[in-house]
Image (cartoon, rainbow, N blue to C red):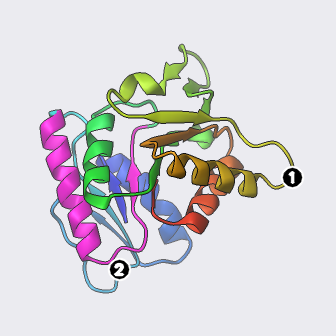
């Protein structure tokens, strides 16, 4: 299940699931429920421009719904330039889901948005966006891409260490689609991770 802060994000995140042949639905409102037979469900909380309190309430509701529906995996989709109520929504999701750790990877390499050293870089201009500035009160660690041939194993070890240290958030360097895939695969191996 995907919980997005706007309709565009919900649609963008749902496309790969539909393209892979899964029965995919998009909820237009935070309290919509999927129809029978769903395999992938993206919900629009419509909280990008709302107050942080309203954003937290809607994300909490969506997370509780995801649990009640038996969602096998939950992804909290955020804006790739950290617009909106990122910290409030992450805290709300963490409060309901109680993940071992949260992986925060706002990269969107296909659109020229990458993460390196805890900063978002947007192709074509603008200063780097420091992710930590958007996470007041949350403990996080910035992790460079692991060197060597088996990056997936390196990510798995880094994620496991961060979870053992009880950090709230891990921010991995994600400069390519491959990086994102390897981080997601490593998280799936460990389990109990909010992406």
Contact? badges 1 and 2 (CB < 8 Å): no
The percent coordinates of residue 71 (x first, y second) are: 36, 73
Disc 1 packing (10 Å; few <14; some 14–19; many ≥20): few
Question: In the image, which residues are magenta?
Answer: 52-79
Q: Position of residue 113 (x, y in %)?
A: 57, 33
Residue at image location 33% in from the left, 86% down from the top = 37
Could you tell me residue 152's position as x and y percent? 72, 56
* Magenta span contains residue 91: no
Residue tagged 1 = 149
Reply above or below: 122 against 79.
above
Badge 2 marks a residue whose secondary structure is: loop
Disc on res. 185: none
Which residue is located at x 41 percent, y 74 percent?
Answer: 72
Provide the residue designation for mark 2. 38
Write down the quadrant of residue 14 in the picture.
bottom left
Q: Nearer the viewer, mark 1 or mark 2?
A: 1
Q: Tell me what residue is drawn at x 37 percent, y 30 percent.
A: 135
The residue positioned farthest toward the front in the image shown: 165
């Amino acid at each position: 299940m995907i919980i997005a802060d706007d309709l565009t994000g919900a649609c963008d995140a749902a496309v790969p699931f539909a393209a892979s042949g899964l029965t995919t639905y998009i909820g237009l409102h935070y309290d919509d429920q999927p129809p029978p037979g769903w395999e992938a469900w993206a919900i629009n909380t419509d909280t990008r421009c709302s107050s942080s309190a309203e954003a937290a309430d809607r994300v909490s509701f969506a997370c509780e719904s995801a649990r009640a529906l038996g969602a096998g995996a939950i992804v909290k989709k955020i804006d790739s330039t950290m617009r909106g109520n990122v910290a409030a929504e992450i805290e709300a999701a963490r409060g309901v889901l109680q993940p071992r750790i949260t992986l925060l990877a706002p990269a969107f390499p296909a659109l020229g948005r990458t993460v390196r050293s805890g900063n978002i870089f947007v192709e074509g201009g603008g200063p780097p966006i420091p992710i930590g500035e958007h996470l007041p009160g949350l403990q996080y660690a910035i992790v460079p891409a692991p060197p060597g041939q088996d990056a997936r194993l390196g990510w798995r070890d880094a994620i496991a260490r961060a979870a053992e240290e009880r950090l709230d958030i891990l921010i991995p360097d994600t400069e390519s689609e491959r990086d994102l895939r390897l981080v997601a695969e490593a998280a799936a191996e460990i389990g109990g991770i909010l992406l």
